[in-house]
Amino acid sequence: MVIDIWKKIENKQFASIYLLYGKESFLINETQQKIVGQAISEEEMDFNFSSYDLEETPVETAIEDAETFPFMGERRVVVLHNPVFLTAEKTKEKVEHNVKKFEQYLSSPSPYTILVISAPYEKLDERKKITKALKKQAEVLEAKKLNESELKTWVRERAAANMVQIDEGAIDLLLALAGTNLMMLTKEIDKLSLYVSDTSRIDESVVESLTARSLEQNIFALVEKVVQRNTEDALRIYYDLLKQNEEPIKILAVLSGQFRLIYQVKELARRGYGQQKIAGFLRVHPFRVKLAAGQAKHFTDEQLAAIIELLSQGDYEMKTGRQKKEMIIELFLFKLHEQSLSNAR
């Protein structure tokens, strides 16, 4: 897990070779920064740090650098970006790579160099000899979206790195309000940590007061208020979005997406799919599936179908200019409130 790799790096237990691959760019960049920050000092950066884009530079050039003795320091860090030859992608590369030279280095890596391979690809070609050799020799980080448990652990660790403690309820609320984007969460945790510097504890009230909501999370909160039959608060959230210059047509699109997700999660759960399998099938984060499943309990299939039809009708009316855009969503919210009331009876 990424947290375990980070702990080793922070304790200066370095591997000779790191392979960082996957689509979660934040994890790749953060890991790379931790390696560089822990392995060499700022004074050594000019002499003992090198970065190569393998779409522009042959891999053997980078390997020659990795085999060079460090200057005025204990070690070198050499980062290789975009090693497309590790994938099955068919591309017209600008340069030819001596992959054999790379294979030879992997079998006997330099003891004074940390080689970091940064591969922003979802999959590597496991059939290739070079990929097999690299995975065998390297400390491997697959930078994929964290599941709910990993995400909560990551939030705790990020808070701990800022010398603060975060309550379990505060973690749940933070994920509900800010979403699961790691870059956004990092900014929020760092901000909250600064705010609680006196007490060193982040609780739910601090998260509620200070966390910035994304449009998607505001829409989730809006739907949640309607589920709770609190139309007044739902309208307040909507009016706040308008004050923030959010376009009604964009708000309607996100609303439609949320109710489609609720409907799909409800249907797939009925078919026996688990949370992780639903998330993979719908290509959304498992935590979003969990939240949608909670909201799905408050609607029947017929109600969800009627709501999606209302949203589709609202979209048509907005695009044809039949009614004032802001009014269309207001009317939708009132109709949604009526749905919730009828469901409660």
Image: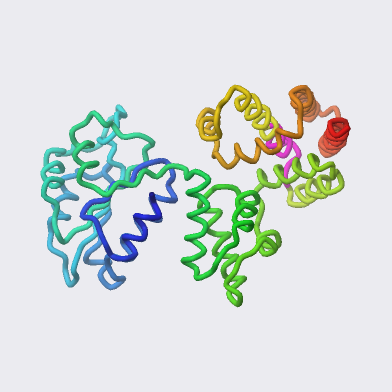
Q: Relative to residue 47, is residue 195 drawn left or right?
A: right
Res. 286 image quadrant: top right
Res. 271 image quadrant: top right
At 29% across and 29% down in the image, what residue appears?
88
Q: Relative to residue 152, is residue 177 drawn left or right?
A: right
Report the residue that reaches farthest toward the bottom: 198
167 and 162: which one is in front? Answer: 167
Q: Relative to residue 276, is residue 172 drawn left or right?
A: right
- Residue 59, position as x, y percentages in the image: 19, 44
Q: Relative to residue 236, is residue 13 drawn left or right?
A: left
Specify the segment rendered in magenta. Answer: 246-256
343 and 225: which one is in front? Answer: 343
308 to 160, vertically: above or below? above
At 68% across and 38% down in the image, what residue appears?
294
131 to 62, vertically: above or below? above
Q: Is residue 66 magenta?
A: no
27 to 123, vertically: above or below? below
- Residue 195, position as x, y percentages in the image: 62, 70
At 16% across and 61% down in the image, what residue appears?
112
- Residue 60, position as x, y percentages in the image: 15, 45
At 27% across and 54% down in the image, what residue appears?
51
The secondary structure that dominates the magenta segment is: helix
